[in-house]
Amino acid sequence: MGWLWTFTNSSIGKKFVMAVTGLLVILFLLIHLAGNLTLYWGEGAFNGYVSVLDIFKPIIRIIEVILTLIFIFHIYDGIRLWYENKKAKSIRYKINASSENSTFSSRWMIWTGGIIFIFLVMHLSTFWYAFNFSGKTEVDGIEQYYNIVTTWFQSPVYAVSYIIAMIFLGFHLNHAFQSFFQTFGWNHKKYTPFIKKFGTFFAIVMAVGFASIPIYFFISSLGGK
Amino acid sequence: MIKLDSKVPEGILAEKWTNHKFEMKLVNPANKRKYDIIIVGTGLAGASAAAALGELGYKVKVFTFHDSSRRAHSIAAQGGINAAKNYTNDADSVFRLFYDTIKGGDFRSREANTYRLAEVSNNIIDQCVAQGVPFAREYGGMLSNRSFGGAQVSRTFYARGETGQQLLLGAYSSLNRQVKLGNVEIFPRREMLDVVLVNGRAQGIIIRNLVNGKLERYSAHAVLLATGGYSNVYFLSTNAMNSNATASWRAHKRGAAFANPCYTQIHPTCLPVHGEGQSKLVLMSESLRNDGRIWVPKKAGDTRPPNEIPEDERDYFLERKYPAFGNLVPRDVASRNAKYVCDEGRGVGGGRAVYLDLSDAFKRIGKDGVKDKYGNLFEIYENITGVDPYENPMLIYPAPHYTMGGLWVDYHLMSNIHGLFVLGEANFSDHGANRLGASAMMQGLADGYFVIPYTIGNYISTEKPEKVDTDGSEFIDAEKNVDDTIKKLLSLNGKHTVDEIHRRLGHILIDKVGMSRNEKGLNEAIKEIRELRSEFWTDTKLVGKAEDLNLTLERAGRVADFLELGELMAVDALNRNESCGGHFREEYETPEGEALRNDEEYAYVAAWEFEEVGKWQLNKEPLKFENVKLSARSYK
Amino acid sequence: MSNENLSLTLHIWRQESSKSVGSFEEFKVSVSPDASILEMLDEINNGLEKEGKIPIAFESDCREGICGTCGLVVNGHPHGPLPKTATCQLHMRNFKNGDTIYIEPMRAKPFPVIKDLIIDRSAFDKIQQAGAFISFNTGSAPDANVILISKETADASLDAAECIGCGACVAACKNASAMLFVGAKVSQFSLLPQGQPERYKRVQEMVAVMDEAGFGSCTNTYACEAECPKGISVTNIARMNRDFIKAKFISKEVEV
């Protein structure tokens, strides 16, 4: 397996690892968003969805481990690339003209990624912890998942930071989506312009989809529901 | 007196090279690795020679003053490369390519050399395609051809307007392969400043490392110079900024004869000079003359803008003088006539430029049609001049472009110094007094890929040069000679910069040894160049150190050589009492004002032998023509 | 052609040698709008030499935009702000009277400064020596028309082969990645039938040397394509990626 090691440590190999793990994360996000959207169907729908997941707990645990590994590889290679790339360009220009030759999303991946990581920690320590380990998911035999979520989103600080994180997720995805096509070598005159546009559309859908939930519940809470 | 033995083999023209390849002695494949060969220059000739010799197994050391061997000025050649493939079925043949080339050169080249060039032209195309050179193709996948000046057949292969770049990168890729295989070693940022002779044979060179300024010695069994032409003697030319004659000139001063230095080509369609700060001239493809009409105002000193000059006050001088060929006369004729009208004060705005007007083409094929054909040239023009050529006629003026003269070589491409071979534009052979379009790259690659690999083996196996030590007295003396020159240059502390002197030399040469020459002007030029040379050696200012990267010092050494070469160009032009090709003497013209050759007295190669600065001895190699009939060129 | 001269303030990078620390030197100049930026530097140098001062070291050769020798970073743009133009073709009429211009060498760890604005780009040669060629010996080629190549393929190969090796892609990239350059070299050959036999070996060998030289990785910002004087497309990077991934997963060689 020496060749695989050489490959993953080559410049293109590192990109490849970023792209593969990124793509898997995108798939995960799609499923996650679909689940989250059940919140709009009310308490019963959401609680039902989470209970179904609960039935497959062992499988979910395995998937969580895999997801963790994917995240670790994605983050590790991301930081490694950032560090090595910075070293290759140790002296910067007096005048920075990069805004005239490249997009914000493409240049700020490490920082948008970093913010998403901070959010991830926050997110895990709130929802994921609460759902799995807090022991508060049931009160008097009634599932509390929906209530836990809506309660958190009534906090302006939590809701706003969630929304900001999702904006950064949008930027991150905007570059990421078309980027994995390029890294895999799928660049074609006919399709690439569409892929780029679709990537932006996809990033907006994902960011708006996730962010709409705290917005909805926060505004609802103001209505004194 | 040196003995000029052309070593042209006996026999029928078409069989000379084939038979000679058999007659030449070989070096055993296993022995080749025992021989070191030095190549100076990495243009088409140098790179192809290095690759081909590396493939044979010789140990090759290649030197270039560039930071990378890929940057030699061959890269800037635009139009294409000729070959007698006859892919277009228009009755082309090796003999026709040979005939066009020798006629285009006004019958001043060696028949056998020119024929061999035409003969190997086909191999070059095969070679380049195999290397992966992306030549232009037809939809069916076959190679595409276009036509070029001086020929009535389509035999030019091309890759957009970047043929030189693609051919050079092809040779460079083969060279890289040999570097990887360990047969070739490349020494970039090194400038050759002397050739070392041991027992009369070229056995090494002295190099200045351009990064740290240190002098280095290298020895070998043979030395190849592929160092290009000397158009930069004119200061403003289409050559690259660093193109120079130093390697050739230093070899000349060691005894190599310099042949036909007065044969220089001035290309008619270049952008005119815009001001004193200008550093070089840019060529616009000759193809523009297919649709453009060249004119100047009839009245001297007419400063009206072009659109305000009515039709009957314009002088379409080429169409007037040459009704048959009109704007498509050969390069030298077009250039000379542009000079004449400007001398009369009828240049645009009284200056040195003529109009190249495509408004008739706009009417005929529309602006879009013109854009299709010449769009990229129009963009270049607008980028450089800031003037929109769709609204105003272009301004053009001739510029020095190529030098047919160079170090004298025999049929084996060896100079009169044994072991010193000269390839490509640096030698004098093949093109005579004028070079046709798309022939320069052909010659560079022919010399490197298909001539030198055979002739060098013959030299090594017949003359058996020994390996010499770089600690020998010859190397020490040569290095001291170089070092003394550098010290002398750096001690100069006068008023003028090197560039100022070079610019003045250029003015003298373009005025008096340029597109047309006369006895009075040439004598003046010799006097003025001598004065300028002494001014250079007394009143120039140099800055910086010897042992450092010192661009001023590099230029100074080259200009010092140009100041000697410039004089020899005038001396040669004065000696040649005839007009032929790029050399036009005003005293020798037909009643119609055309070039008048004197085949009786001047059908020879003038090979000048260096005696001391400003003093040469003339050696003549008579030219025999057995296969072509000498005729006068007429384009009326 | 000529209008009035422009008055400009220049900040030019000066650095005595690779080992010394550099800094910007300020020059106030008046320059013809018809001059190229390199001709402006020529003029400054002529003045410096006259005063007995060391001129600014910068490189250029063909001054027609094809040799790739020049390559200054002008106001943060390799080859200056004009798209698809090499430094030598950048004319001063593209600037305004009173402008301040910063001129710096291209920056990247594998391109160390030699002096002032001159950098060492020999890493590019090393990458090409690793495999940017087709292995065959002179004289053994078949007739040129035996190999049929569609016009489309030949054009695509030439699009990649037009690269002038100036290093602007590396200079523009925030990661100092050389992938546009290497991608173009790989593509030129991998598109052509002549390049097929060595296609997968070539890409692996060239990428290995590229990595060794210390260039960064591509993060697909495409700044390289935007700044390339020849407009080389990032499609070439994708092709290199594809060839490389394929080579690693499909080729039978365990180590290259």
Image (cartoon, helix red, strand yellow):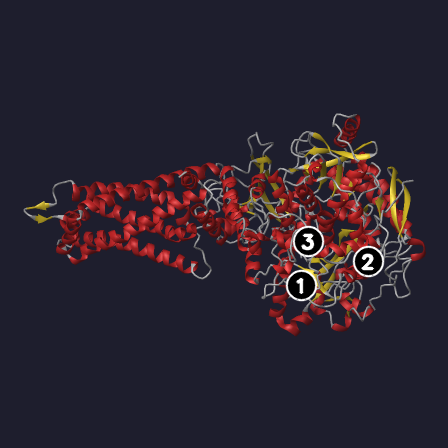
The Cα–Cα distance between marks 2 and 3, rounded to whole angstroms, is 21 Å
Contact, CB < 8 Å: mark 1 with mark 2? no
* C75 over A195 or under it: above or below: above
The answer to which image quadrant residue B210 occupies is top right
Nearer-the-camera pick, B115 or C59: B115
Question: The disc labelled 2 sits on which kind of residue?
Answer: Ile
Residue at the spot 77% in from the left edge and 38% down from the top edge? B460
The Cα–Cα distance between marks 1 and 3, rounded to whole angstroms, is 17 Å
Contact, CB < 8 Å: mark 2 with mark 3? no
Residue B148, given in percent of the width and then of the height, sits at 72, 62
What residue occupies the far right of the structure in this picture?
B600
Mark 1: secondary structure: strand
Nearer-the-camera pick, B48 or B608: B48
Subunit of label 2: B
Residue A22, given in percent of the width and then of the height, sits at 34, 48
User: Which residue is tagged 2?
Assistant: B102
User: Which residue is tagged 3?
Assistant: B77
Residues behind callouts 1 and 2 on a single chain:
yes
User: Which residue is tagged 1?
Assistant: B145
Question: The disc labelled 1 sits on which kind of residue?
Answer: Asn
The first of marks 1 and 2 along the sequence is 2
Residue B451, given in percent of the width and then of the height, sits at 75, 48
Image quarter hosting the N terminus of chain B? top right
The Cα–Cα distance between marks 1 and 2, rounded to whole angstroms, is 22 Å
* B141 over A107 or under it: above or below: below
Question: The disc labelled 3 sits on which kind of residue?
Answer: Ala
